[in-house]
Image (cartoon, rainbow, N blue to C red):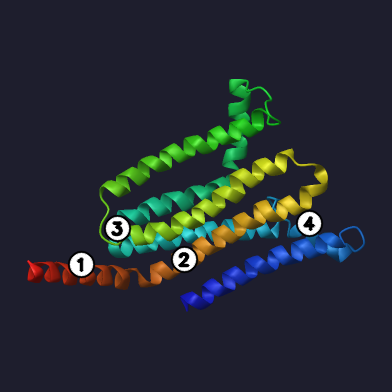
Amino acid sequence: MARRTSVVLICITVAILAVFVISGIWDEQSRIAHALFRNLNPAWDEGVAESFNHGLSFMAAIFVLMAYIQVRARVFLFLTALYGFIWLDDSAQYHERAGEKLGQALGIPVDYGLGAQQYGELLAWAIAGLLLLVVFAWFWHGRRPGDTGIVLPFFLCFMLLVIFGVFADMLHMVLPLRFDTLMQAVEDGGEMLAIAASTSLALGISRNVEAYYDGVALAGSAETARAQAAG
């Protein structure tokens, strides 16, 4: 069931992005294409694609919280905080709004093609990152066998999200306007795929987390027995 649901989530995400890109080709020639292009634009905060993305990040946070309730491993509280923040950032535009306030308050000058807004957004990301780092340190201090195998695939998904959400965003801001549609698909579409992968991963783990940690404990016991026998 979890595998089927994960496949469906990934397919829906890819389908939304494909229709957005294709409809953009005929945006000015067809009303239907224009409506699809507008409503499926992943950069539009009130569009279908962005609402779907909000739902994905919220579900990811809920799934890892469910995993924590089952096994009480700190790693899942860290992941709940991480994906809860991602949902908050997407739904409330945290880094855009905080970046604007920080840029104005600090009087950041325009430099290397980036202005106060862009530098303010990077600073807002850094502040959030430091807070999450504190939660990560708390989890890592109390980690248990098997936690690394949980956090590593989520880390890879999060790195994809950072690449598309931060670096592609910065690139989008400095490229000429003719690349706008392409960069929307790359930046926001890449974020959607990273979140969809995370949600699929969180769903699968929440359904199998007890069996996973039971297997880790069994493997640890077997390793201990072998070490004692060898000694």
Work out whether residue 47 can be spotted.
yes
Distance Cα–Cα, label 3 vs label 2: 17 Å
Closer to the eye: label 3 or 2: 2
Q: Residue at x 57, y 35 (%)?
A: 122
The residue pinned by badge 1 equals 220
Where does the image place residue 110, in percent across and percent down from the top left? 69, 25
Q: Are marks 4 and 1 in contact (CB under 8 Å)?
A: no
Label 3 secondary element: loop
Could you tell whether 3 is left or right of 142 in the image? Answer: right
Could you tell whether 144 is left or right of 176 in the image? Answer: left
Who is closer to the viewer here, 136 or 45? 136
Distance Cα–Cα, label 4 vs label 1: 54 Å
Neighbourhood count class around disc 4 (C-alpha, 10 Å): few under 14, some 14–19, many 20 upward: some
Q: Earlier in the sequence, mark 2 or mark 4?
A: 4
Closer to the eye: label 4 or 1: 1
At label 3, which amino acid type do we have?
Answer: Ala
At label 1, which amino acid type do we have?
Answer: Gly
The residue pinned by badge 4 equals 38
At label 4, which amino acid type do we have?
Answer: Arg
In this view, 35 is above or below 106: below
Q: Earlier in the sequence, mark 3 or mark 2?
A: 3
Where does the image place residue 167, in percent across and percent down from the top left? 61, 44
